[in-house]
Amino acid sequence: MQAGTGNVLQDSFERQRGRYAVHLRVAGVVIRLECSQEGPAGVLLPSLQENQIPAPPGEADFAIAIWEDEEVFTHSPVIDELRRYRDRVSVSHQGSRHLFYNPEGEIFCFIDTDINRAWYCVADRSALPDYEVCTPMRFLLHWILAARGLVFTHAASVGRNGRGVLLVGRGGAGKSTTALACHLNGLEFLGDDYVAVEPESPAHAFHIYRGAKLTDDTLPRFPELSRRLHPTNKTQNKNVVMLNHSDGPIVRSLPVAAVLRPRIGGGGRTTISPAAPSVILMEMATSTVLQAQGGGQHILSGLAALCRGVPCYDLELGGDFGEIPRSIGRFIDSLGARG
């Protein structure tokens, strides 16, 4: 990894016209997005909308430059080397510096946590894939949050009366179906695919994205969300929806009272039963490490602390779609009664 990569990227960014700033607060971390007028910020910001805040009086904790510059991808020796491998994501780590290149959508990220700066450049914002529009800048947010002891976790989260649960598991396990059914039936929604977790007791989860992904097969089960469809390049055959408070409450943080592992059952009733924390940890940590692209030890130790501190359960999803949020709501209430 070249030490001068940040300088090259900063030079490219400073040549952009019409720069402006947007501020986010994610899990208490204030991030200044330095955006170019003709750049991808307008594509990335809708999913991050709930985190936007007015400009703070002091310095932000972190800064990310965001812009579009095709020349960076055609003239940079670093990217030129990575572009030789058109079929794979490239990741590199060197101390506090972390580099990420995704050939799908031509996305190049570079972050240095020692100086609290990052750069996010794309060749063409119109080519960004569906998952990047739904859950943007995952690589950068993972490292920003890790520097503050938080875990960028592959999980959904919902709650009731200010008490939350994490929904964990591999893709297709039922996390999105469960989270969206709860969102549309009065439960508090924190996230569909990724949340930030403060693992030490008392554990908390924090909202990052309001975007959610649904397959073509699953979308008809949520006719209420058809008006929330967001235009994207369907590179993974997923529909992106941007959730809205008018459909159900969206919250910024929740204490974690339990971890649930959804499974699509055989059509009976929805049931919740105790599960071995080691099994839940393995599945949650494996999927998170694969998504995060680095920092595996930090992720594993953080999620292990979480599973030691809160109870773990299997959630068998029954065939009655409306029963799922009712069952989870009753379960969360029962945790309060026990505690």
Image (cartoon, rainbow, N blue to C red):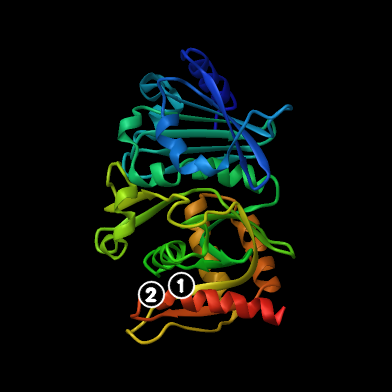
Locate residue 252 relative to residue 114 in the image: left or right.
left
How many neighbours does mark 2 have within 10 angstroms: few (below 14), some (14-19), or many (20 or more)? few
Left or right of residue 190: residue 222? left
Q: Amino acid at mark 1?
A: Pro
x, y percent for residue 171: 39, 64
Front position in the image: 1 or 216: 216
Residue designated by label 2: 322
Q: Quadrant of the C terminus?
A: bottom right
Count the numbered circles shown: 2
Label of residue 20 in the image: none
In percent of width and height, residue 51 lies at 57, 42
Q: Which secondary structure lies at badge 2?
A: loop
The answer to whether residue 43 is above or below residue 149 is above
Residue shown at the point (43%, 82%) measured from the top left: 270
- Residue 166 visible: yes
Q: Which sits in the foreground, 209 or 10?
A: 209
Tell me which corner region of the image, top left, top right, bottom left or bottom right, holds residue 77: top left
Question: Residue type at mark 2?
Answer: Gly
Q: Which residue is mark 1?
A: 325
Residue 73 in picture, x, y percent from top left:
38, 25
Q: Is residue 261 above or below residue 217?
A: below
Image quarter where the N terminus lies is top right
Task: Give the percent coordinates (x, y) of residue 22.
Answer: 56, 29
Q: Is residue 277 visible?
A: no
State yes or no: discs 1 and 2 in contact (Cβ < 8 Å): yes
Q: Is residue 331 left or right of residue 248?
A: right
**What element does badge 1 sit on?**
helix
Residue visible at 36% across and 66% down in the picture: 172
